[in-house]
Amino acid sequence: MEHAKGFEPFYDEKSKLLILGSFPSVMSRKEGFYYGNPQNRFWRTVCGFFGEPPPTNVEEKKDFLRRRNIALWDVVTECSVEGSKDASIQGEQVADVEPLLKKSKIETIFCNGSKAFETLERNFPTLLSRARKLPSTSPANPRFSKEVWENALSAVFGEEI
């Protein structure tokens, strides 16, 4: 078990959607930014929705997020974890999500997988009215649905694409 820290939230005052993951994978922690595993479907799915190719480096990822007003954070900011397994997370510190919402235009929260949603639900029940649980984009999730993600993104950004 490794004790690890996650990342600071990536957002600005124009962000309108917060995508909350659970905790960065080993590959993401090595890269130093969200969704660093090339097998994770996150960048292909979200960029594909906007008709853009997936970014190839961290600066391109940040540029995409800024242009599309998307904020990223993980609901667990520090924990003990075995590899990249959500099920092994112990002794977690939880992100203080509410102040981030006040510093931006975020109206909607997508939880990337069950662990993110359950942690948000347990710690911030008042935010559930604006939260939506989506299937994890992790390569370990056999029930991933690109269509569910595209429908959710369309509900937030439909007029903008």
Image (cartoon, rainbow, N blue to C red):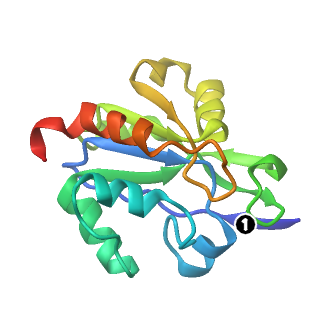
The x, y position of residue 47, in whole percent, is 31, 60
Above or below, comparing residue 22 to residue 40 in the picture: above
Q: Residues within 10 Å of mark 1 (few under 14, many from 20)?
A: some
The x, y position of residue 57, in whole percent, is 39, 81
Q: Amino acid at mark 1?
A: Ala
Q: Report the number of discs.
A: 1
Picture residue at 54% right of the left edge, 52% below the top: 137
Closest to the observer, 146 or 9: 146
Disc 1 is placed on an element classified as strand
Above or below, comparing residue 59 to residue 128 in the picture: below
Picture residue at 79% right of the left edge, 50% below the top: 89
The x, y position of residue 36, in whole percent, is 53, 72
Picture residue at 43% right of the left edge, 34% below the top: 98
Closest to the observer, 88 or 138: 138
> Left or right: where does residue 130 sit relative to residue 25?
left
Picture residue at 10% right of the left edge, 37% below the top: 159
The x, y position of residue 61, in whole percent, is 34, 71
Among the 4 quarters of the image, the one containing residue 10: bottom left
Q: Farthest residue in the right direction? A: 1
Q: Which residue is mark 1?
A: 4
> Left or right: where does residue 71 sit relative to residue 136?
left
> Left or right: where does residue 108 sit relative to residue 122?
left
> Left or right: where does residue 104 sit relative to residue 29?
left
Query: Which quadrant does the N terminus fall into?
Result: bottom right
